[in-house]
Amino acid sequence: MESLSDTKWDVVISGTGLPQSLLALALSRSGKNILHVDPNDYYGGPEAALSLQEADEWAERFASGNAEGVFAGAQVTKAADGLSFPRAYSLALAPQLVHARSELLSQLVSSKAFRQIEFLAVGSFFIYRPASDPAGSATLSRIPSTREDVFANKTIPARSKRALMKFLKFVLDFESESHAEIWKPKANDDLAGFLESDFKLDRDLQSYVITLTLSLDGRVSVADGLTAINRHLTSMGVFGTGFAAVYPKWGGLSEIAQVGCRAAAVGGAVYILGTGISAVQAMPATQSADHEELEVTLTNDVVVKSRTLVKDSTPPAAGCLNLCRLTAVVESSMPAMFEVVVEGAPTPCVSLVAIPPGSIKRSDGSASDHPVYASVHSSDTGECPSGQSIVYLSTISDSSSKELLDSALSSFLETLSPGQDQPKCLYRLSYEQRGGTGACSVDKTTGSFSPPPPHLAFDDSLLVSVRQAWDLVIGDSAADTEYMQFEDREGAVDEDDAFAA
């Protein structure tokens, strides 16, 4: 460890969450001396993917409801049998889909990191419909999001189809001058009201549209809603027929984080897991160093000197969105959730189910206040063995949200086999995730990442924060340096790939 103290580091990066790992990727060919540490003994930080044994240990660590940091209130329950060996599972702590038009994918292509990631198609979006009478059964209704989808749908009346088509056509060109005149005066209004007043969409069609925005509270402004739906619609078909988003195999964003760290390691960065930072002291400029340096004390008592430091800012800021999450391993392959619905499309490995507010009940009979989302993953994601599936449920956190997620899981499983026994739930991991702004604050020689907002889809605004941290490390030459623009390393395989098209 003496060599760590002897080295003049350009940057010490603390944490291997997604923003720090993307920063490592961006710096991987900069020639900078990089020391990258993480107090955890696994990569990925808040975006990590864990084996069952790691998840059990993680839950013990974050069991307290008053724990500081991103996670709290973790609890595990498991069946007596049916589970495979622990490393047959890779449970994502914060699964997010990535739209095809996301700038993240563009940067992974230009940096050549995409060659090390296998992306899978995200399939259909569904709406949960509770039974209309006591003798009936709840159902899942697939959301149409293309012209062909709308016309093929047999449950939407012809008049409603015309109204929906009018709206979809409007969204595809919503930034044009003529269309902006319609929505901009109402930009901060509720999207649901806009859909009703300007496009005559009924409540069912409104719920279809709002689900495509992935709004966690079910309430979204006209401006934000149109932007989100446009992203979804324009992403459709970019990388292949029949899907608008992708999901990285083997644990989602955790896989991207590991690829970023791997690229930095190849470039000469030094990695130490299980080691964090215990103290930081600013050292004034001297004759041997014409700029301020930081003296960074690691938790293993090694002291290193660095020109800059990039770290997490914890705990998350007050007033940010908090989610309650439930990860369930289910003993069923759920084939109905992963059907190919467009000829020539790949078999999807992920589907999304929205359970609108009011669709499920608490034990006291009161209705849910916020939507619940279930991201359903097949074994093809590499997150569970064949014959099983993983359901990631999330809703805005409150005193009854854990109970609501249990009810939502049961309600969803009932739709898979009405009138029959539900598929067996083998493992449950519940916890609270505290969100931040995702912003990077820079103070002279230190950059601090706020935890990312716990969105269901990757938010490209996080990339702005990564660029700010990169500018801090690169310094005065940042404006003259290509960012995330790399040639293939010598010996890299030059293979055809959909993302390079």
Image: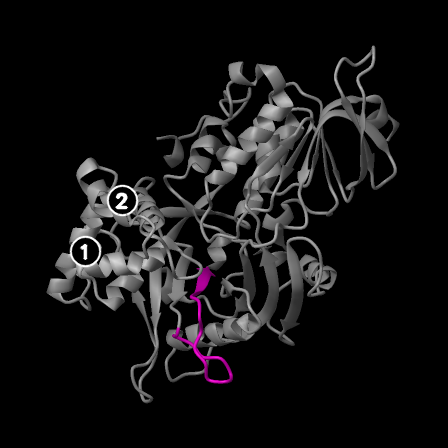
Q: Looking at the rendering, in which quadrant would you find the N terminus?
A: top right
Q: Give how far across and how far down residue 405 sits, in percent.
A: 51, 71
2 and 1 marks in contact (CB < 8 Å): no
Helix, strand or loop under label 2: helix
Note whether residue 269 is visible: yes
Q: Is residue 166 above or below residue 6?
A: below
- Residue type of the residue flagged with mark 2: Lys
Note whether residue 89 is visible: no
Residue highlighted by disc 2 = 184
Q: Give how far across and how far down residue 80 sits, in percent.
A: 65, 76
Q: Give how far across and how far down residue 89 sits, in percent.
A: 59, 58
How many C-alpha atoms fall within 10 Å of the one at disc 1: few (<14), some, or many (≥20)? few
The residue located at (71%, 56%) in the rendering is: 68
Q: Is residue 136 above or below residue 221?
A: below
Pick the residue in front: 259 or 467. Answer: 467
* In-image side of 461 versus 7 (left or right): left
Residue 264 quadrant: top right
Identify the main secondary structure in magenta. Answer: loop
Which region is colored magenta?
358-377
Residue highlighted by disc 1 = 198
Helix, strand or loop under label 1: helix
> Residue 497 in magenta?
no
Q: Give how far across and how far down residue 218 sits, in percent.
A: 39, 62
